[in-house]
Image: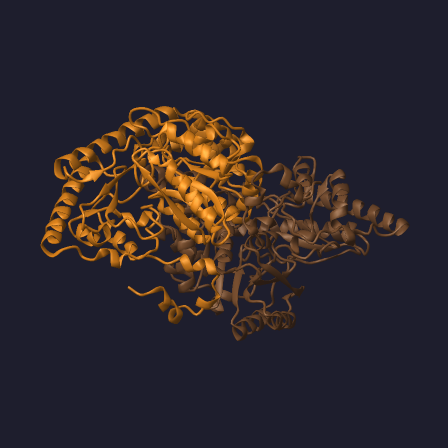
Chain colours: A orange, B brown
Amino acid sequence: MMSPRSGISLDPWFDNYADRAAGLSASEVRALFAVASRPEVVSLAGGMPFVSALPFDRVRASVDRILATEGATALQYGSGQGLPSLREKILAVMAEEGIRAGVDDIVVTTGSQQGLDLVAKLFINPGDAILAESPSYVGAMGVFRSYQARVEHVAMDEHGMIPAALTERIAHLRTAGVPIKFLYLIPNFQNPAGVTLSATRRVEILDIAQENGILIVEDNPYGLLWFDSPPPQALRSVDEGGVIYLGSFSKTFAPGLRVGWVVAPHGIREKLVLASEAAILSPSSFAQMVLADYFDTQDWKSQIDTFRGLYRDRRDAMTSALAAHLPDVEHTDPAGGFYLWLTLPEGLDSKDMLPRAITELVAYTPGTAFFADGRGQRHLRLAFCYPEPDFITEGVRRLARVITEERELVETFGPAHSEVQAAANLESPPPEVV
Amino acid sequence: MMSPRSGISLDPWFDNYADRAAGLSASEVRALFAVASRPEVVSLAGGMPFVSALPFDRVRASVDRILATEGATALQYGSGQGLPSLREKILAVMAEEGIRAGVDDIVVTTGSQQGLDLVAKLFINPGDAILAESPSYVGAMGVFRSYQARVEHVAMDEHGMIPAALTERIAHLRTAGVPIKFLYLIPNFQNPAGVTLSATRRVEILDIAQENGILIVEDNPYGLLWFDSPPPQALRSVDEGGVIYLGSFSKTFAPGLRVGWVVAPHGIREKLVLASEAAILSPSSFAQMVLADYFDTQDWKSQIDTFRGLYRDRRDAMTSALAAHLPDVEHTDPAGGFYLWLTLPEGLDSKDMLPRAITELVAYTPGTAFFADGRGQRHLRLAFCYPEPDFITEGVRRLARVITEERELVETFGPAHSEVQAAANLESPPPEVV
């Protein structure tokens, strides 16, 4: 591996980059993931939704209808804020989670990732602190880092972020004079930990944020994908003035159209529209109209129910296999979403172990990807969203073999001094893995 | 109109924004454009391509084929750099303009606007200078401003940017100690001026950039839309190491899919991919596959030829009407693209005149939108891309009436002291107007 500094000799424009570009370097994990995409590898790394469960013929009907009747609008530039017809549908989708808003409150984005990028661009000066769960979404930390934020992790347990830890962290940063720009949360079936913020803690965290004048950014791509019962109310449904809400069609429909949205308080929303126009002029009219038509004419609620059943079966396959093959290894117990978080036995390092796992034809995402500060070596994220249940079972069996062998090595020779090797920087896994 | 400061009382998060958000404010021109979109107004303001000339049934055939055979891929996340199959087609499109590149050199973006945003994010520190034509593309200046760049206009005439003026500006900035990050150029049928950089000047400007170690960003959405003969060679076709090239499907196909691309030297390209993944994860697989299929199966060269003829007729309608109704008013003579640049008689102000023009049911874009420094009051941009020729003729007739009346007013009462009123900031017209 070459160090970033070696870029000096390879890239004649190296000295011209903005300061914020320093954070943009590909990690060695990317090369491993390229190998992991081979068909014989069971990948428990990727966060790809299982789009094959969608009714492609009905999507085609939507596209055909639009091109036949509104082709010239679908292929043209649109409004920077997004098409009103789609924003109407978004209100209906959010109503399923108890969120009330107006058509004017919504900004349609190129996936909710662009929403995150715009929010980060709007608020982050270099050195500003962003509070996040511990661990947190790798794609969010990548965005925050690209605007030179300082990500401050707040401890969490199986009920989500711990309010006392949040209070402590805020006080610490205030004393140090570091501006806190917002608190970034994934309250439901969190990526990567698979835990859900409890109802009590939602209230406590909202109170803490209000008392301290801290904006909340609530990222909720998985909220409708619950397995047994819906998660507690969205933070946005309680506090309209202090929460920016990020929504996505990537998990309830499909990521290939790249459509998400932001709901924001009035003043912020106005600036988001202008920032989005600077970045992309307008979101795709074609994609928005296909989605609006699909959500207008199809039974999308049943489709989401289909997804729920499908992911529930896969979660069950994974937890059963873990109980059978790794009975004494700790992991979270997700009640929805795509992910489960596993804690390795003492002395093991998930990043060091990854090449061996891939040799054994199973892949996962090392825990260090989800921390801004080099932690996470003893953790890894397992995704149960994409492979069929039998493959999940086989993947966990392979992983169990790798962990058992690794544990025997450690017991014989001692740990591989992995803490020393772990770089205090974020990984940049490829997009299909985040 | 309220001043931006009044936001303090309206937006409780006003003090939390990043410094770069200060540039994000909607101009009063936006409200006027909302009125201008009424059907009875002939809009010569909008830069919307005439997509109704596309064969919608063949686009539908491409979509149907993709959903029938590759639906699960089209609806899934894709590579951050873009699908290789589309990048192959992009090579074929660029070959039409003499540009040779490899599939690996290309980064697919959400319209070329996102390419501009990524380049700006990668290079601009607050206060850095960006050199641009005078006037320049409003959407580019909006992006540069959003990263707190200082846009430095370089004089141009009917042959494009003047090399001696470029040398002078570089020397001036170097003396002042201002870092120059790149030279932004639209060499072909420039937006808004409608002029083309001559072959001789291309060589001179490349030499000046090389001598001074200045990167060139070549924005070329209109290059294939020439009316009589192709423009001179692209700068990228001469200099691979010193030019970032931005391409777009918005004018040769349609803007509604939001697909453009960047060709960049190796080191820059690697960082662009990582920056794009941070911003949007990956461009739309669906949109990319529709485009790849269309460019694979359809006679896209004939389609571009159709567009050429169509826009040539509209340019002719506009220049004939100008000759008939405003014979002594100066304007450029575009040999391709969408726009013509008009200079008003002394004492007239295009921004002051706009409400009156809209009352007379014709709209245009005031010249101040295309300068970062408040200049352009005596200029306006006329777009001939969207209205049918008869409407263009009628629009120019109405504009002539407005100018004539305005001129009479000025001759009677003197100029309206418009220089005092012009704000030294950029306009933010809505996306369909840029």
Name the residue at the front extreme. A175
- Please state which of residues B87 and B31 is positioned toward the viewer in this rendering: B31
Residue in front for this viewpoint, B367 or A104: A104
Vertical relation: A273 (above or below) A199: below
Q: How many marks?
A: 0
Extreme residue in the right direction: B412
Q: In which quadrant is the N terminus of chain A drawn?
A: bottom left
Image location of residue B174, percent across then percent down: 59, 72
Q: Is residue A388 left or right of residue B382?
A: left
Q: Residue A380: give x, y in percent of width and height.
A: 25, 45
Position of B360 relative to A33 (above/below): above
Q: Residue at x 10, y 50 (%)?
A: A408
On the rendered image, what quadrant is the C terminus of chain A found in?
Answer: top left
Q: Position of residue A162 (x, y in %)?
A: 36, 37
Is residue B113 depicted above or below A261 in this figure?
below
The answer to whether residue B413 is above or below residue A82 is below
Look at 52% across and 34% down and name the residue there.
A70
Residue at point 25%, 54% (across, down): A32
The percent position of residue B162, horizontal first and vertical second, equals 64, 69
Front residue (pair B78, A125): A125
Q: Residue furthest bottom?
A: B211
Q: Is residue B290 visible?
A: no
Give the left or right position of residue A262, taking residue A267 as reference. left
Residue B126 visible within the image: yes
Q: Nearer the viewer, residue B338 or A373?
A: A373
